[in-house]
Image (cartoon, helix red, strand yellow):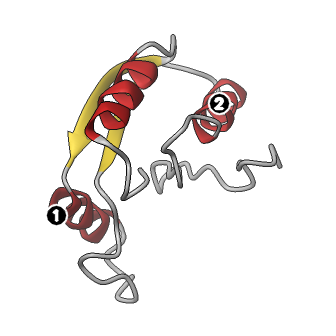
Amino acid sequence: MNRRATKARVRGLRAELAGEPEVRAVYFESQAEAYAEFRRLYTCSTSVKAGQLPASYRLLLHAVTQPTRDDLVRRIYTLPGVTTVSCDPSNPCVDVGRSGG
């Protein structure tokens, strides 16, 4: 999430994410919570320091296929206020970005 996003934009983004048909639940994570989750998931990464990760939303999806999930990631990249999208490290969304690559 863009660090300079207004409160209204943050709320609007949540509503847009929750409205995606593949999304089962949306959870807000503060900057500290996002960093703690990053540390939990990526135990080998010491290059990212506290304060480098923005507040974010964590999405739980319904059962979807890989192509459907990748299409969702591409759509999320187009939403105002979104700067990055990460996927579960056990099924990363590599080669899925703003350009659709």
Residue 62 visible? The answer is no
Please say whether residue 41 is visible from this viewpoint: yes
Along the polypeptide, which appears first: circle 2 or circle 1?
1
The answer to whether mark 2 and mark 1 are in CB contact below 8 A is no
Residue under pointer 1:
32
Q: Which mark is residue 4?
A: none
Identify which residue, 44 or 98, lies in the foreground: 98
Q: Residue at x 24, y 34 (%)?
A: 27
Q: Marks 2/1: CA distance?
A: 26 Å
Q: Is residue 74 left or right of residue 80?
A: right
Name the foreground residue: 44 vs 78: 78
- Tell me: residue 10, above or below residue 97: above
Rendered residue at 37%/48% (across/down)? 5
Q: Place residue 59 in its image quadrant.
A: top left
Does residue 79 lie above or below 92 as drawn?
above
Q: Residues within 10 Å of mark 1 (few under 14, many from 20)?
A: some
**Mark 2 residue element:** helix
Crowd class of label 2 (few under 14; some 14 to 19; many from 20; radius 10 Å)? some
**Measured along the vertical axis of the image, is residue 72 above or below residue 34?**
above
Instruction: Return the x and y of residue 76 as percentages of the image width and height.
Output: 57, 34
SS at mark 1?
A: helix
Q: Which mark is residue 75?
A: 2
- In this rendering, would 83 be left or right of 49? right
Location of residue 8 in the rendering, given as x and y in whole percent from the top left corner: 31, 31
Would you identify the image quadrant in which residue 42 lies?
Answer: bottom left
Residue 25 in percent (x, y) is at 30, 22
Mark 2 is on which residue type?
A: Arg
Residue 47: image location, x then y, percent: 40, 89
Name the amino acid, label 1.
Answer: Ala
Q: Is residue 27 left or right of residue 77?
A: left
